[in-house]
Image: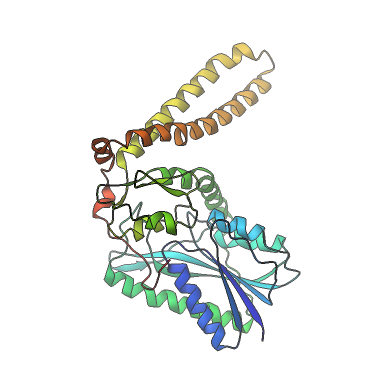
Amino acid sequence: MSKVSIHYFTGTGNTAHAVKVLAVNLGAAGYEVIISEVKKNVLPPDEVCDYLIIAFPVLSWAAPVMMRKYIRRMPRGQGVKAAILAVNGAIFHNGELVKGYTGQALEQVEGILRRKKYDVFLTANASFPDNWTQATNPCNEQETEAIFPLGEAEVSAFTEKFLLGSRELYRCGLINRVWSFLVAELFGLIGRRAFGTFFIADDRCTGCTLCAKTCPAQTITMKDKKPVWGTVCEDCNRCINLCPEQAIQVSVPLFFLQMAINIGLTVGAIWAILTYAPHLIQESKIFLISSEIILILVATLLLLWVSFVPIYACFLLLLKNPGIRRFFSKSYTRNFRRYRAPDFKP
């Protein structure tokens, strides 16, 4: 009996459900299926099976950073056949179904696997209900019921192609690959960390610790019976969607204050560099301009760290005051729906 090893990351359960459908279909076809969920501190097994399948949700046109790091730690494939399934968020817009866009995500993961000497022969997408609750109101019940069968059908089609050994690789085009790669890298380096620091638990929080216990990145800790988000957030939105009291919000005041402080510090640093660098660097114009660019990049990255570590720590101290916490809990997400895949129990 051939063995298929499936490795997946999931936030709110869409990818987990896709993997369940995939595993049932492969099992019915006579394959032995081994499933590994990717979380912090979970390492890939040393064993290489007959086939490999990677499944993940698309976050800002890329696989989650944790997923990519996990794949890079996998043993060399030595020609083992591999397939990749990307799960996108679909929505209804003006009554019409709009599927999510993968960008360069599949091609990036394909490249990582090829460098690990896996023979990637199949890459595909599956559409399930969108649930980036930080930014948009998740699908309602009727939309979810309409989208879910579509996603399951796409997973089944992926399974059929896998069983047939069909060689079919998704391509988004060079221009789309370039811009989506740049956005994805910025999100992986800065965006996901920043978004994590904008979460806050409002006065409905009971301190149940569910968010901290189920966070796949283990970036949530409990302080004074309230969750606090660290800077290694994957922005998978599991916490905001799973909270039983719908107490987790995106803090609008915290967002604007953090952004204002960071922009102010960055503009000030750039002004200082452009003003004083010509007096300190008495070299050719090319050398001066190159030095200014390097200094601006270094200052920008350093000030991002300052904004989202020490300054964020100061905000956390202020949030110990109930009145200040109520002010910072002002959010557009209070009236948003919450979403998890129907059978998801992390």
Of all residues, the one furthest to the front in this rendering is 224
For the N terminus, the quadrant is bottom right
Of all residues, the one furthest to the right in this rendering is 78
| Residue found at x 47% / y 48% | 192
For the C terminus, the quadrant is bottom left
Whether residue 172 is visible, yes or no, is: no
Q: Position of residue 318 (x, y in %)?
A: 33, 33
The front one of 132 and 321 is 321
| Residue found at x 50% / y 54% | 217
Q: Position of residue 64 (x, y in %)?
A: 52, 56
| Residue found at x 50% / y 56% | 61
Q: Position of residue 108 (x, y in %)?
A: 61, 58
32 relative to 115 in the view: left or right = left
251 relative to 31 in the view: left or right = left
Note whether 249 is above or below 49 in the view shown: above
Whether residue 103 is visible, yes or no, is: yes
